[in-house]
Image: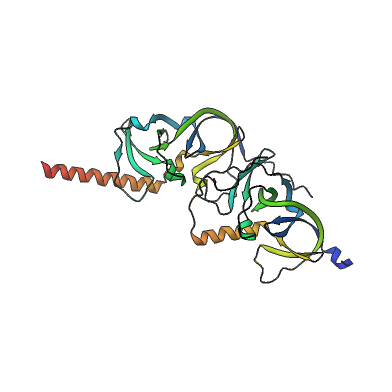
Amino acid sequence: MNATDNTNAKSYVLVQIGDRRFAMSAATVSELAPPVRLHHFPQSSPLVAGVIVRRGRIVPVYDVSRILAGKNSPAHRFYLVAARDFGSVSEPGAIPVDGECELVTAPTQNPDPASPKYISGTLTIGEENIQVLDLNALISSANTGSANAGSATAKPNGIESGETRA
Amino acid sequence: MKIAAQEPTKSRRIRRTEAVILFTVANQLFAIAADSVQEIRSTDSLGAALEIEQQEIPKVRHTVERNHRTYFVVNACVHFGLRVVRPTLVLILRQVRVAVLVDKIERMTEVSAIHALPRAFIGVECRWYRGLAYFEDQVIPVINPLGFLTANEFQRLDGSLAEAASQRTLEGAVQV
């Protein structure tokens, strides 16, 4: 890394989702929560798997692993809580992650032009190229896709999902 | 790891104690404000329920008459997309002409706060629920009594009732 790279360096949290690692801007991340209970109730919002309770707040959980890793999250998982923007208002949202997270500071490169819009850049950590996730864009893309597909069927109580208690 | 900025000072939690009835539908727990329920009856005691002839709104198959008003009986399993089980109770609501078929009343209790539904929720649940209550380590959706049937659905059901009534009148006239 040279001096020019350092000026572009920002802090990222590296998370494991399925078999892959992704980076999220550390500025948006508030905490890594233990595998607390995931509460389900009937609802039809795309990607929303349920809610968890953190520090007295009810936090929606977005199961992004189906998009990013092509499979459902395993039962025992941590939750990375990050801010999601709704216009001028920000609200915490959680994504299930596997294993431990790592904080790194690294310069960002532009994403591959063929990458989905929710990839905002790439980091090079050692030999590994890690894609930087834009959580807002990721969830928005899922919502748009669902709206286009006309999906409005309510998801019942998620008996099939891995419900865990801390 | 940097801690995210503090939340906006305006809390989305509605702070008041509220009496609610906790009930289950297909093992899913729900809460409804006690003052929005006029009456709770066993389905066995609803012998006078009339079948309504319409296919458009599958969650409504019957009507009941209470105090000279016709209530549309909504099957909560179908409404919420849950596994259909045989209901044992019916909640007759106060503000709307809706009676709801449910499995079991758990109890009546008070909740100290009803949290607004997070903005992540954008589907039909925004109409179904007033918010969420966190009570005894459970997050329980708090029912919006006005969310069982839309104005359009009421209109269509009223239309079906009117059509059935005129059909009966016609049949009566023919018999005479």
Residue at 72% of width from left, 68% of height from top?
A111
With respect to residue A151, does B26 lie above or below? Answer: above
Query: In the current view of this chain or complex, which residue is farthest to the left?
Result: B176
Residue drawn at the location 61% of the way across and 57% of the way down: A71
B171 over A118 or under it: above or below:
above
Q: Nearer the viewer, residue A40 or A142?
A: A40
Q: B30 or B10, which is in the foreground?
A: B30
For the view shown, which residue lies furthest in the bottom direction? A113
Residue drawn at point x = 31 percent, y = 36 percent: B49
x 22%, y 45%: residue? B166
Q: Is residue B96 visible?
A: no
Above or below residue A132? Residue B53 is above
On the question of residue A154 being in view, the answer is: yes
Q: Choose between A151 and B11: the one closer to the eye.
A: A151
Residue B42 is situated, as x and y percent measured from the top left of the image, at: 38, 30
**Whether residue A162 is situated above or below residue B22 in the rendered picture:** below
Identify the image quadrant of residue B79.
Answer: top left
Q: Is residue B70 left or right of residue B132?
A: left
Does residue B1 appear left or right of residue B76 in this picture? right
Q: How is the image coloured?
A: rainbow
- Where's the C terminus of chain B, which quadrant? top left
Number of residue marks: 0
Query: Picture coordinates of residue A87 (x, y %)?
Result: 64, 53
The x and y percentages for residue A25 are: 75, 56
